[in-house]
Amino acid sequence: MPANLMTKKDMKELAAEAAGSAAEGGNPRVKEVTERLLYRVMQVIDECDVTMDEFWAAVGFIAKAAKNNEFGLLVPGVALEHFLDLRLDEADKRAGIGGGTVRTIEGPLYVAGAPLSKGEARMDDGTDPGEVFIISGQVTDEAGRPIPNAIVDIWHANSKGGYSFIDGEQAPYNLRRRIQTGDDGRYLARSIVPNGYGCPPESATRELMGLLGRHAERPAHVHYFVSAPGHRTLTTQFNFTGDKYLHTDFAFGTRDELIVTLDRVTDPAQIRDAGLNRPFARATFDVVLTKETATAPKTVVEREHVIAA
Ligand code: DHB
Ligand code: FE
């Protein structure tokens, strides 16, 4: 069939009717968004002459993603989670807010309720053969003043790129910790250098990436939520210089300001001073939080999170 069989007017009217624009009741916000969404879907179908077979293949794809509970993976893969960050960045800019640590996506693999400790934590349970990793940093305000009692909630993959709880192979909350900063705003985490994460082999997300000619891999990264009373909660991550996937992250999470360089420590005296018995890697990740105000765009995201038993 040819493309562009329909008039804009006909599509607009049908979308409006389907979205209940003439119906009383319902939720006005849902109606507004549904109407615009349907209109745009109709336009795409008509412009691209999407066949019925293609349409139902797409419905099947969405059903598969839903059955696998994969929407949280799909959304970053098609850049929409990053897009939400870009919008929030712009809203901050227009509100005159700047100077804090740059945000980036949460991703789908957070587990709430990780063990909480003061000042420092060991994140790994000692079974991962990967490289020991010491992360240290300071949480400050925009003026550089330390923020005591900030909660630094850190989670990352193991040396195989797997996340505890999600991969079903690790102890609950392995590589997931909340650290409360000391009076000097500092935190210290002992962990294992993570590997990059790849979408599961049979996932709908990986299948889509294949159809788009893209890979389904993320560079190694460490996730953070940082919160403190009177300050805006920050969702961010850091990556590592030299990572193969650093600039092609399938989830669009890499940001130039969030790339750290691993310092490899091999000097026996330094290894001893760190209380270790083998070479290790270390990195610094300092965090600057912006002030909470009545008019600042909201940064706390209400989103379903699992809690490990
Ligand atoms: C995905 C995985 C991650 O570890 C992450 O941080 C973001 C996204 C994903 O599978 O989409
Ligand atoms: Fe991740």
Image: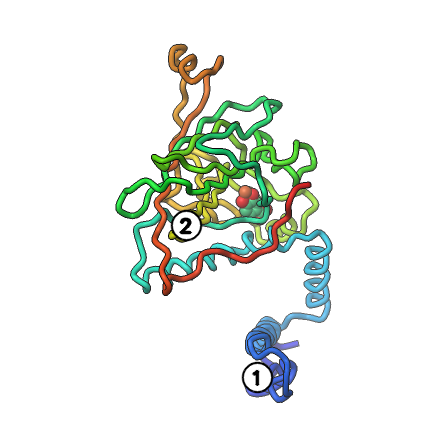
**Amino acid of disc 1:** Lys
Q: Is the CB–ligand 1 distance for label 1 below 8 Å?
A: no
Q: Which residue is mark 2?
A: 229
Of 149 and 121, which appears nearest the observer? 149
Of 300 and 264, which appears nearest the observer? 300
The percent position of residue 62, horizontal first and vertical second, equals 68, 60
Of 7 and 252, which appears nearest the observer? 252
Q: Residue at x 58, y 53 (%)?
A: 212
Task: Give ligand 2's quarter of the image.
Answer: top right
Question: Relative to residue 260, is residue 142 depicted above or below?
Answer: below
Q: Which residue is mark 1?
A: 12
Q: Is residue 291 left or right of residue 47?
A: left
Question: Relative to residue 35, is residue 266 depicted above or below?
Answer: above
Quick check: can you spot residue 18? Answer: yes
Quadrant occupied by the N terminus: bottom right
In the image, which is nearer the foreground, mark 1 or mark 2? 2
Q: Residue at x 49, y 50 (%)?
A: 105
